[in-house]
Image: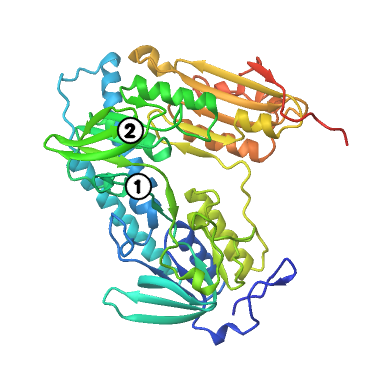
Amino acid sequence: MARKMLIDGEPAAALEEEATDFDFDLFVIGAGSGGVRASRFSANFGAKVGICELPYHPISSETIGGVGGTCVIRGCVPKKILVYGASFGGDLEDARNYGWELSEKIDFNWKKLLQKKTDEINRLNGIYKRLLSNAGVKLFEGEGKVVGPHEVEVTQVDGTKLSYSAKHILIATGGRAHLPDIPGKELGITSDEALSLEELPKRVVILGGGYIAVEFASIWQGMGSTVNLVFRKELPLRGFDDEMRAVVARNLEGRGINLHPRTNLTQLIKTEDGIKAVTDHGEELMADVVLFATGRVPNTKRLNLEAVGVELDSNGAIKVNEYSRTNIPSIWAVGDVTDRMNLTPVALMEGTCFAKTVFGAQESKPDYSNIPYAVFSIPPLSVVGLSEEQAIEQANGDVLVFTSTFNPMKNTISGRQEKTVMKLVVDAETDKVLGASMCGPDAPEIMQGIAVALKCGATKAQFDSTVGIHPSSAEEFVTMRSVTRTVAAAKPRTSL
């Protein structure tokens, strides 16, 4: 039986019926990262749990998806596999200066890598199904929608509709790629298709300046494609630290990617020579593939939520409180469908907190402070905490900025002209480290450890007193002694 929890002074469930009055204590719509985590942990707390997910396919639509969701099937995992594959191109070039005698011609077999990628996501899809089964979660294959505060309808592959009652309903349907409304948009593809192309394109045009755009630009360039990256701002990766954005842009160009800042696409035209991508500056960029990496929107369109009274924002995201609860007390939501912080580990955190709160008698809410994340460009960018701009805006006093720019030891022999850049942002009065960022090899692996330090409230003095690992790039984070600049905060410090 599900335990009753009080949240903000009221019961976690909308009504006080016993769990035995329902088919399930919890029914989850969406078996991606957040949904699988929430269902497994809820079942471990003793809840009777059902979950539904669309039939499996690498390329999603409104009627196909798969257990594991975006991250496992058509996001983080397959993307990282392709990033690894693309990175070998540069490594092989560098290897020559390390004494490896390589033939002048090095062939790349796209189809082989693609099959390996597909094999891995098929394996993971099976693992996720077993995780649910082992936890005692009942999996239904089909499209779910909410038909009442305690009722879910699942349309199976053969069209059969099944209805189930649940004391709690959790929405974890993630997001979908957003396509710009321009003439010829049907000629473009999204990241779903980009991860499953049958042939490696020789010429690529990418529209967008975010994670997905930058990562695919690196992937395709690393595999030998000619890449044109078109984005509306002056620098890619809007929302990141401006100094680090400039570093990424410089690295992209250094690797041979053609950047088109302050530019948009206005039309795609099919020609005998491929696809003509027309920009708002009148340029005509020829491509075999045009990737739209223009953002994602919450996947709420077919859930029937508004009919049930669940509030959505103007972007279609489900509005939730700090415990992931909607305005309908029996309906909850986690992950990208809520459009809070759209990262897989965050969805996992939200799913865990939901299960603890509703079924574990442990009132828990997600903590979004000092969450580390990475852009898997080549080389990657990783950050945690505040950017310099955010620190200046939020701090009550001066902000100290420490930076280090250096040639990684590997590059001194290989001859690659690509600097690693590190940065710490510090509160001048408290000495607390507010943010850290790095662009260079192994940045995500290094930043995970830095994130622990920031989560613990580390000061710059504690960084300075830590012995470095030598020789490594990571040691630079504990050897930056000289202030690069001091910046006055946007608001003066006030005394208490």
- Tell which of 34 and 319 is nearer to you: 319
Q: Which residue, given by chain and number where applicable, does mark 1 sit on?
A: 181
Q: Quadrant of the N terminus?
A: bottom right
Evaluate whether residue 264 shows in this view.
yes
| Amino acid type, label 2 | Ala
Q: Residue 432 appears at what percent x and percent y?
A: 71, 31
- Tell which of 449 and 299 is nearer to you: 299
| Amino acid type, label 1 | Asp
Of the numbered discs 1 and 2, the one sitting upstream in the chain is: 1
- Tell which of 292 and 79 is nearer to you: 292
**SS state under label 2:** helix
Above or below residue 324? Residue 492 is above
The residue sitting at 35% across, 80% down in the picture is 161
Q: Which residue, given by chain and number where applicable, does mark 2 sit on?
A: 217
Above or below residue 153? Residue 429 is above
Question: Which residue sits furthest left?
Answer: 272
Q: Residue 292 appears at what percent x and percent y?
A: 33, 42
Residue 18 figure quarter: bottom right
* Relative horizontal placement of residue 277, taking residue 326 as reference (left or right): left
